[in-house]
Amino acid sequence: MGAFTAGLAAAQGVGMALRVSCATPVVGPVGGLLGVGLASAAAGQASIATRQYLADRKVPGVQAPPFRGVRSEDLVVDALLGIAFFKVMGGRFRSVMPSDVAKVGAIARESMPAAGVEYATEKYRIELRRLFRRDGCHHCGTRRGAVIGDHMPPNKYVKEYVKTAERAFFKLPFVKQAAEALAIPTGPPKQRYYPQCTSCCEKQSAAVRNDKLKLVFHEVLHHGGRSQAWHYAGTLLGLRHYSGGSAGGGSAGYGANGRRR
Ligand SMILES: [Zn+2]
């Protein structure tokens, strides 16, 4: 479990270094999938090492050189099982990568239609506070501080779209009428409110103003909301290595309890 969490955090670090966010097309979800696979293989090896320790009362890796006795089929099976568990339990691969503050964040679960480019009114704020307490900031996952109704896509992009669309395309005769007749949307993109913290809001205004890519870390195994089940992908994986063992009884019992709770 610890190795699984550490593996996912490492995957997010790699995403950060390579400037891949949860909103990056293709590479974002694929990077997340690879991250889950690697984290699962690491969790499997940690389980094997624990089982061996419980069986022999010897710290593995001290007497034996590292990586000796690592079976490649264990790595592959653990990686594939981990990916399958993660997906079945409702995990999203894109959410393993860091959040891009100019896009919908990795923690995002629920949002509501925004009433134009204005700040959220009190009616919306009550609901936003509820989402913030439950799920946290959609970029970093914190539940601390005040909640902000974050417009997605950001106001600046919507305003720019309206300006270019009006200046170029829809000024041509009949274009707008033809598009409307064919039911092609001609209006600005519909915006939605997402719960956001003040720190991410400040990072976002700076990033959008300067057209800079700004990524933020989030808690990969985020507690709360509906994302909880897939925390146990790593625990389930560990159980595989205990099923045949006898000495690992105590630890396996703990894992099974943790899963059912
Ligand atoms: Zn935040």
Image (cartoon, rainbow, N blue to C red):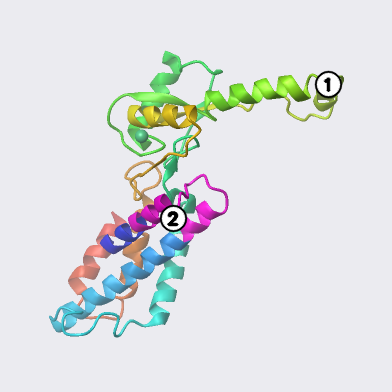
Tag 1: amino acid: Leu
Tag 2: amino acid: Met
How would you classify the magenta stretch by its main secondary structure?
A: helix
The yes-or-no answer for disc 1 within 8 Å of ligand 1 is no
Q: Which residue is mark 2?
A: 89
CA neighbours of label 2 inside 10 A, class few (<14), some (14 to 19), many (20+): some
Quarter for ligand 1? top left
CA neighbours of label 1 inside 10 A, class few (<14), some (14 to 19), many (20+): few
Q: Residue at x 15, y 78 (%)?
A: 59
* Magenta stretch: includes residue 23: yes
CA separation, marks 2 and 1? 51 Å
- Secondary structure under badge 2? loop
The image position of residue 204, as x and y in percent, is 43, 31
For the question of whether residue 87 can be seen, the reply is no
N-term-proximal mark, 2 vs 1:
2
- Quarter-of-image position of residue 6: bottom left
Q: Which residue is mark 1?
A: 172
Q: Residue at x 37, y 60 (%)?
A: 233
Does 121 sit above or below residue 209?
A: above
Q: Which residues are magenta?
A: 9-33
- The quadrant of the rendering that contains the C terminus is bottom left
* Magenta stretch: includes residue 169: no
255 vs 136, left or right, is: left
96 vs 60, left or right, is: right
Does 148 sit above or below residue 23?
A: above
Q: Residue at x 34, y 57 (%)?
A: 10
The image position of residue 147, as x and y in percent, is 35, 25
- Quarter-of-image position of residue 160: top right
